Image (cartoon, grey):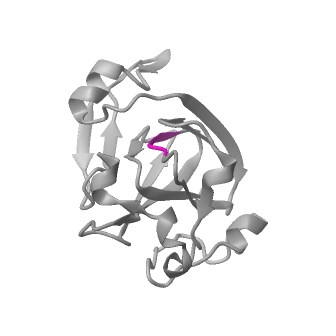
């Protein structure tokens, strides 16, 4: 397994080892010992799966309290996956990192607690899955506008298909201070 660090501390792009032949392939999607060695030491408590069509954009989502770390990957199709640093006190606060992940490249993206997360579907449809370090808590769920000019994400779609919640999400500057994370409190 190869691990690539990003310009934002904590975000990792993981390329699992693939064993393939004429019959197909095999890969470990998660192995606690290997991921701990790579820097992903959190315990996972929930797995999620979503199916979306081309142009669907989900995000930018986070929850606080009960912040979730997410190990994301694509089982079918292709997405542009994004994480935004929303840790107050972080030198990269408000910066984003995007990664094209697909069933072809089989990349995984580790997004630790303290980040907002979203993705846009590039293929006809995408089967997207992720492991979470905390249970989903709808009462603590928050969103940030996908097109926030302060964050300025270079999305590969100009007119995405959005949920009502995502259409009406606030800009980062309008998110209540108590909903953002403090860098040292996440350790």
Residue at (68, 58) in percent of width and height: 54
Residue nearest the viewer, comparing 74 with 185: 185
Q: What residue range appears in magenta?
A: 68-73
Q: What secondary structure do most residues of the magenta stretch adopt?
A: strand
Query: Eyeballing the image, is 149 above or below 67?
Result: below
On the question of residue 175 being in view, the answer is: yes
Q: Work out which quarter of the rendered image holds the C terminus and state it.
A: top left
Residue nearest the viewer, comparing 131 with 108: 131
The answer to whether 147 appears left or right of 162 in the picture is left
The answer to whether 95 appears left or right of 63 in the picture is left
Task: Looking at this view, name the residue that lies furthest to the top.
Answer: 23
Residue at (27, 55) in percent of width and height: 184
Task: Looking at this view, name the residue that lies furthest to the front.
Answer: 178
Query: Eyeballing the image, is 29 above or below 181?
Result: above
On the question of residue 123 being in view, the answer is: no
The x, y position of residue 157, in whole percent, is 59, 71
Q: Work out which quarter of the rendered image holds the N terminus and state it.
A: top left
Is residue 179 a member of the stretch shown in magenta?
no
| Quadrant in the picture for residue 74 | top right
The answer to whether 27 appears left or right of 79 in the picture is left
Residue at (24, 61) in percent of width and height: 7
The answer to whether 30 appears left or right of 162 in the picture is left
The x, y position of residue 30, in whole percent, is 41, 24
């Amino acid at each position: 397994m190869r691990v690539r660090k990003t310009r934002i501390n904590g975000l990792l792009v993981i390329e699992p080892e693939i064993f393939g032949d004429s019959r197909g392939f095999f890969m470990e999607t998660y192995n606690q010992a290997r991921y701990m060695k790579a820097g992903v030491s959190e315990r996972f408590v929930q797995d999620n799966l979503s199916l979306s069509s081309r142009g669907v954009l989900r995000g930018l989502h986070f929850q606080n309290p009960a912040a979730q770390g997410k190990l994301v990957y694509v089982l079918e199709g292709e997405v542009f996956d994004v994480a935004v640093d929303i840790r107050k006190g972080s030198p990269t606060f408000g910066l984003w990192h995007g990664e094209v992940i697909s069933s072809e490249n089989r990349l995984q993206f580790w997004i630790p607690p303290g980040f907002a997360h979203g993705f846009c579907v590039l293929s006809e449809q995408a089967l997207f899955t992720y492991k979470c370090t905390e249970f989903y808590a709808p009462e603590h769920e928050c969103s940030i506008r996908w097109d926030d000019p302060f964050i300025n994400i270079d999305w590969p779609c100009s007119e995405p298909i959005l949920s009502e919640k995502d259409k009406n999400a606030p800009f980062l500057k309008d998110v209540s201070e108590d909903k953002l994370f403090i860098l040292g409190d996440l350790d």
